Amino acid sequence: MPDSDILFRSFERGNLSLKNRIVMAPMTRSFAPEGIPGEPNAAYYRRRAEGGVGLILSEGTVINRPASRNEGGIPFFHGEQALAGWKGVIDAVHGAGGKMGPQIWHTGSTKSQGGWEPESPVESPSGLLAPGAPRGDVMTEEAIADTVAAFASASADAKRLGFDLVELHGAHGYLIDQFFWGGTNEREDRYGGASIKERARFAGEVIAAVRAAVGPDYPLALRVSQWKQQDFAARLAETPQLMEDWLQPLIDAGVDILHCSQRRFWEPEFPEIDGEEGLNFAGWAKKLTGATTISVGSVGLSGEFIAAFGGEASTSTGIEKLVKRMERDEFDLIAVGRALISDPNWAEKIRTGDTGSLKGFDRSALGELV
């Protein structure tokens, strides 16, 4: 096993101070009855803090909008009971010496894999689930304004409850990403447009409102992706210039950290420019904007996550590719997903070299909070 010390360097940027570079990635678990997180949720996150994770990002937790979630059991980040539940979560994590931020979410017009449907019609930029696939309501400007305000309110609550940062979910074909994507944003008003820079207006307004709500120094992350659950091959930015056009305005609006999701972190984003060992998505985002970046995508496991969540088992593997990229300072932090669902002590096992007891991932692990 390669020397993993680089993963355990401390990290400090502004008001965010972490003991190491390992982040628990947000992963939907749907174990919040009536949208209210309770003691089992708090214990689940506490175990990851005890297991050595430097920063925990919660599963997606939704804003106060009708049909903002696409599965029953997804937690709310609004309402007295849900926020009291989240207070219990962050207190448990802090009690174990951890740091944590909630991922604030609106699922847009996406569908439940299990057939669950919300009571209200879903909403999206143009009433589309995917290119050419109608679903739900086209958002009015009033609905957009209310949604922006709901993101800001949830983020202010995160700060008030004592979370160490907040992350906005702007990836994977959910609401914010549906505004980015030309295939789902056919609007002819100021929230649409032919260019990614124009279609980023909604995200920019959300970010600016959140920044105003939490103040100038509170850490704000944004998760972004090229791929969509509706189309794994989708790309918002085919060139570095287009990527800069997309991401730089979001940094200017108030984002500190770009959480750059790709299916396999070791794959280069623009191999035609810098080759097969070239910068990945997070590497290019850092190079172009100067922002702190988190990389993520099949860390520590043998199979990529789409196959794994479809039922294919994935065994724990070495982290040579990760160490190599971090040693060249390609990105700042690395998020780990499925490996931490099965093994809350993954980080500590990597730190101590106890690779023999690392656990792989199997879909059956989704049936309980380990």
Image (tube, rainbow, N blue to C red):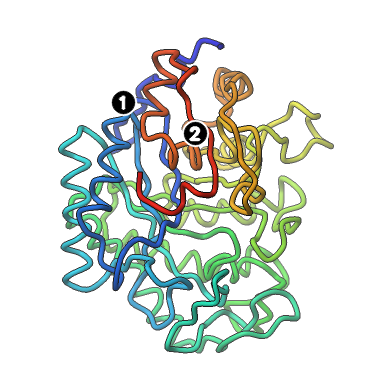
Question: Label 1, on which residue?
Answer: 19
CA separation in Å, label 2 and label 1 = 13 Å
Of residues 322 and 196, the one nearer the viewer is 322
In the figure, 4 relative to 339: above or below? above
Helix, strand or loop at mark 1:
loop
Of residues 143 and 241, the one nearer the viewer is 143
Label 2 crowd bin: few (<14), some (14–19), many (20+), radius 10 Å: many
Of residues 86 and 195, the one nearer the viewer is 86
Residue at 20 percent of width and 64 percent of height: 83
The spot of residue 98 in percent (x, y) is: 25, 35
Quadrant location of the N terminus?
Answer: top right
Q: Is residue 181 visible?
A: yes
Of residues 360 and 97, the one nearer the viewer is 360
The spot of residue 358 in percent (x, y) is: 47, 25
Quadrant location of the C terminus?
Answer: top left
Residue at 55 percent of width and 89 percent of height: 137
Q: Is residue 293 visible?
A: no
In the figure, 112 relative to 333: above or below? below
User: Callout 2, which amino acid?
Assistant: Ile
| Numbered badge on residue 334 | 2
Marks 2 and 1: CB-CB under 8 Å?
no
Residue at 42 percent of width and 64 percent of height: 105
In the figure, 70 relative to 263: above or below? below
**Going by the image, does 350 lie left or right of 214?**
right
Labels 2 and 1: the sequence-earlier one:
1
**Going by the image, does 16 lie left or right of 245?**
left
Label 1 crowd bin: few (<14), some (14–19), many (20+), radius 10 Å: some
The spot of residue 231 in percent (x, y) is: 72, 62
Helix, strand or loop at mark 2:
strand
* The image quarter in which residue 262 lies: top right
